[in-house]
Image (cartoon, rainbow, N blue to C red):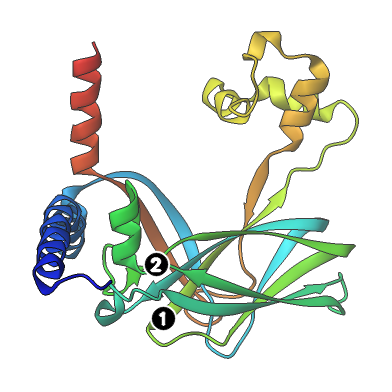
Amino acid sequence: MSLSFAVKVVIFLALAFGSGLAGREYAWPVFSYFVEAREMTARDAHISKRSIVYRIPEKRALAFAFSQPVTKAKIIVNPAVSEEFRDQLAGFTYGLRLRWRDVEGNQLSQHDVYLQADSPDEVFASGAIFRFFRTRPELVAEQDHLMVESMTPAASLEIETFDVADGIIGIDVRMFQQFTYIGNQSLAAYRRLSESSRERLIQPSAFPDDLLTDQEKTELARNQWRSVGPVGLDGRDYTMLVLYEAVREDLIDQNAAGQEVAQ
């Protein structure tokens, strides 16, 4: 038996009322995040970090030469998008073509990597940290990390972009190579580290520094990375930029208030 018209009306009104309550509860906070993202400037942020990044040229590769042949490299990638695409819900896709080369410049291998990044507004609304340029109009989308390997020790690594989505103005990267030590050099290097550097290294460990064995300290010292600069000249072969990382002031205030309540 089908429901009567009156019963259907009652059910519809109940569902509509419930949807209205949910919308008032959740939709407005989400909307306010996006409003804040549009009004946010460097003056409203607590800058926690700044890094030098290198923009990959269009239709040309950017090469990074290592201090000695390596089989592993770490890449941090930041796509920058124009203002009109800052709230694109679908995000952005782009490809990176990686070419490993030996000391003579011969290609050892090539790999294509496809990445997807959330829009700047999505990044702002979903977390406390966001990134920006102080003197440029573009906005920074979601950051990505790559750990890449070569079967043969390589002297350099080239990065080239392809299949870049509309809205992306440029793709900025940082390259890192792992520290290499021989014998007991790792342990000696660990002992020479500053207290803050040691704390950063032992964060994944369940034990404090004074309870770690020499072998554990040796392994931790090997898990260090140093930045690598690109080959060429700034302004000709690449563009060097300063990328700022900031913490949202509203969340800093919230965390401070929460700590006061807890105390």
Residue at (33, 66) in percent of width and height: 120
Viewer-nearest residue: 84 or 3: 3
Mark 1 highlights which residue? 168
Left or right: where 195 falls relative to 218: left
Task: Residue 156 in the image: state x and y as whole percent.
Answer: 76, 68
Residue 128 in the image, given as x and y percentages of width and height: 32, 46
Q: Is residue 40 visible?
A: no
The answer to whether 192 is drawn above or below residue 241 in the figure is: above
Residue 177, percent from left and from top:
71, 53
Mark linked to residue 141: 2
Q: Quadrant of residue 82?
A: bottom left
- Residue at (80, 42) in percent of width and height: 180
Q: Residues within 10 Å of mark 2 (few under 14, many from 20)?
A: many
User: Which of the two discs, 2 and 1, labels the residue nearer the N terminus?
Assistant: 2
Residue 140 lies in quadrant: bottom left
Residue in view at x 13 percent, y 65 percent: 7
**Is residue 184 depicted above or below 24 in this figure?**
above
Task: Mark yes or no: residue 243 visible.
Answer: yes
Give the residue type that dot 2 points to: Ala
The residue drawn where x is 72% and y is 57% is 73
Q: Type of residue at label 1? A: Ile
Q: CA distance from mark 2 to mark 1?
A: 9 Å
Quadrant of residue 142 in the image?
bottom left
Asked if marks 2 and 1 touch (Cβ < 8 Å), the reply is yes
Image quarter (top left, top right, bottom left or bottom right) of the N terminus:
bottom left
Q: Residues within 10 Å of mark 1 (few under 14, many from 20)?
A: some
